[in-house]
Amino acid sequence: MQIAWEDARAINLANWQDRAALHEEAYGLEAFDDPRHLSDVVTDDLTVLLPYVSTLDGKDLCHLQCHIGTDTVSLARVGARVTAVDFSDRALEVAARLAERAGVDVTWVLGDVLEARAHVSGDFDIVYTSVGTIGWLRDLDRWAMQIAALLRPGGLFYIRDGHPMLYTIDEDADDDLVRHRYFADGTAQMWDDDSTYAGDGKVAHSRTYEWPHPLSETINALISAGLRIEKLDEGRVLPWRFSGRMVPVDHGWMWPEGVRDRIPATFTIIARKPA
């Protein structure tokens, strides 16, 4: 459907405000009482990212769309000087409590990712985005411009997200039914679901709007912003259970045997700002 970005953003924000308290309970934050603990997402991402940066120790890193900060705190624990951005003040309150509990310093910034450059001071060696982010954004060209503006010359952008092909699948069907749109056409997809991807809690504001982005759109947005693509990968393991047909594995969920080679679960892009 057609909906103004400002209206969709406000509706989505109400949903994510509700999620903050629910996810504080559901995420198992007590695991961070172990000073060695890192989120599964960051543990996996570091195996891909570190060959390109050698270390995060002492690097300035900006985490966009950080939510309640489990990945943010993990990045700080491996030595990065982290600034984290999110549009939900309730999520940032949870994140700040987690950082204090974990004994790490993070600069938390309340702001829209599409205006990140205006909200954040300084520039960065790394801009990082966790899983489950860009589907909430309508304008990837504007998103990519923020990333390029935040990076220092020679700086690196990293994203791992759900694969757009995955999102075409009917997650409730008993087979691999392609039901949803792959290509972008400027319109949003509306959902009405009072559950979240973690725990059994229910949100009061159940309606959300998301935008499909084919892989080519994401890549071309980054290229148009002046970044150079250094790696593109597609993966089989997802950090959350997209479908009831998925089976648990280390650090996530996979399609069952016979399906996992047909439907990608994630994509990863590493891009660099020319020096």
Image: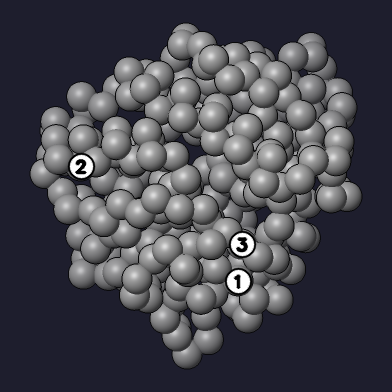
Rendering quarter of residue 103: top left
Asked which secondary structure carries label 3, the reply is helix
Q: Which residue is mark 2?
A: 99
> Does the CB distance between marks 3 and 1 fall below 8 Å?
yes
Amino acid tagged 1 = Met
Q: Residues within 10 Å of mark 1 (few under 14, many from 20)?
A: many
* Amino acid type, mark 3: Trp
Label 1, on which residue?
145
* Residue at disc 1, secondary structure: helix
Judge from the rendering whether residue 90 lies leftward or rightward of residue 107; answer left or right: right
Q: Could you tell which of marks 2 and 3 lies nearer the N-terminus? A: 2
The span from disc 3 to disc 1 (Cα, nearest Å) is: 5 Å
- The answer to which of marks 1 and 2 sits earlier in the sequence is 2
Look at 65% across and 65% down and name the residue there.
Answer: 142
Pointer 3 local density, CA inside 10 Å: few below 14, some 14–19, many at least 20 = many
- Could you say where residue 148 lies in the image, as x and y percent from the top left? 54, 74
Q: What residue is rendered at 68% in x and 59% in y?
A: 140
Say what amino acid the circle numbered 2 marks: Ala
Where residue 253 sits in the image (x, y, percent)? 54, 26
Q: Which mark is residue 143?
A: 3
Q: Is residue 235 left or right of residue 8?
A: left
Q: At 40% from the left edge and 19% from the top edge, which residue is drawn?
A: 22
Q: Position of residue 254 (x, y in %)?
A: 59, 28
- Does 275 appear above or below 71? below
